[in-house]
Amino acid sequence: MDIVAWRKEIQICFPEFVIPAEIGLSVVCQLFIKDIKHPFGLIYVDVSSSGKTIVLNYFSSLSELVYITDNITGASFVSQSASRSKKELEQEVDLLPKIKDKLLLVRDLAPLFSKREDELTDILGKLIRVMDGQGYKNNGGVHGSRGYEGSYNFMFLGASTPIRRKVWDSMNRLGSRLLTYNLDNPDKDINALVEQNIGDISFSCKQKRCQKITSKLIQELKVRGPVHWHREKEDRELVKDIAMMSKLLANLRAIINEDKISEPEKPDRLNSLLYNFARGHALACGRGSINPEDLYFVSKIVLSSAVIPRVKIFKKLILKKGELTTTEVMEAVKCSRVIAIRYMRDLEILNVVRIQNIEGKVGMPEKVIKLTDEWDWFLGEHFRRLMANS
């Protein structure tokens, strides 16, 4: 089984999920690269019944490599339960040792993201700390200080309905450990819905088929690992492309309060995570170095891992050669003029665009945003090819 044969099988069963499945595969394959010690977290985002769980289930039959849970709390990773002994907590309760060098799969993060802001911040804070890959320790009244130190690397795949702005801010405030991919699947027409029920292959058979071939491919890749990666042999220009996309994503994810960037984010961690993701994809394809195909998938993550309106406007800016009017922003985000102007101002505060008035315009006041010189690289043919079909 190789990546080409795997793609063909997924295409037959669920053509709309080839790209998200390949993204998930790239996350898992990071476990097989020797020098990757930082967990990578990805959340599939879309409305209910859009297929997020279908994709996650491709990876669910790898029992020796995948740990599945439907609930994460603040106490999940290192518990302080008074009703259990320390030995019982270590062997039966604590999540962290169970996910070491594995894929943690959470099918529905929406209940977590719907919690009160203080509770959400507490849980995300612990998750983010664990995603440093260096273990986690806490203190409690019953067991005192307990936890785990050392290398606790793992990969993380989850799913959620569209994420609220407050949740985005909470995640970004705590650091750039969690990235997202927006499936954004179009609605099926009547014929597609009919085929779903009475097609030649039943839904359950298609899903089992995808699980089987995904397990087979991952098992074959795992046997080759842990792979020693010769980073010194990488194409420097491709690594530079990742650095440019990291800088953009850091800007697009920044939190704005009172018309200023309140908590700017450095691109260093994003740069490392995106390079590791590109290597994971390269390994999935049977290669030992990255190429432009890997960067196509990196661009998919970059153009999904920020507040959605900002991403939609930026995509439209690229298509329109770096300039958009207020009306075009309204069309891109499907919002009112007042909201569109607010988004335009946000991007100006983030130093992504500059706003200018359109002189002599009759009717509603019209403004135009222009991409700043710092981001001219994204207007070039090279990046346009990378984001083709995104």
Image (cartoon, grey):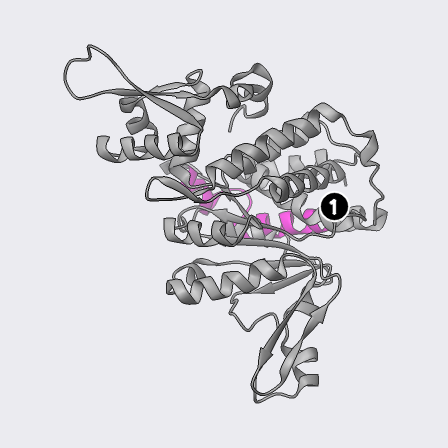
Residue numbers of the magenta segment: 192-215
Instruction: Judge left or right: residue 342 versus residue 156.
Output: left
Mark 1: few/some/many CA within 10 Å (<14, 14-19, 20+)? some
Mark 1, secondary structure of its residue: helix
Total labels: the figure holds 1
**Which residue is depicted at the point 26% across and 36% down?**
339
Q: Is residue 187 visible?
A: no
Q: Main secondary structure of the magenta part?
A: helix
**Which residue is depicted at the point 45% across and 62% down?**
121
Instruction: Judge left or right: residue 379 versus residue 86.
Output: left
Q: Amino acid at mark 1?
A: Leu
Q: Which residue is mark 1?
A: 217
Instruction: Judge left or right: residue 96 versus residue 261.
Output: right
Whole-percent x, y for residue 105 in the image:
59, 58
**Which residue is depicted at the point 55% across and 38% down?**
301
Q: Is residue 374 above or below residue 162?
A: above
Q: Is residue 332 magenta?
A: no
Whole-percent x, y for residue 182 in the image:
48, 41
Whole-percent x, y for residue 128 in the image:
57, 58
Q: Nearer the viewer, residue 299 or 371?
A: 371
Q: Is residue 143 above or below residue 245?
A: below
Outermost left residue: 363
Place residue 313 in its image quadrant.
top left
**Which residue is depicted at the point 75% across and 61% down?**
151
Q: Is residue 168 visible?
A: yes
Q: Nearer the viewer, residue 352 or 182?
A: 352
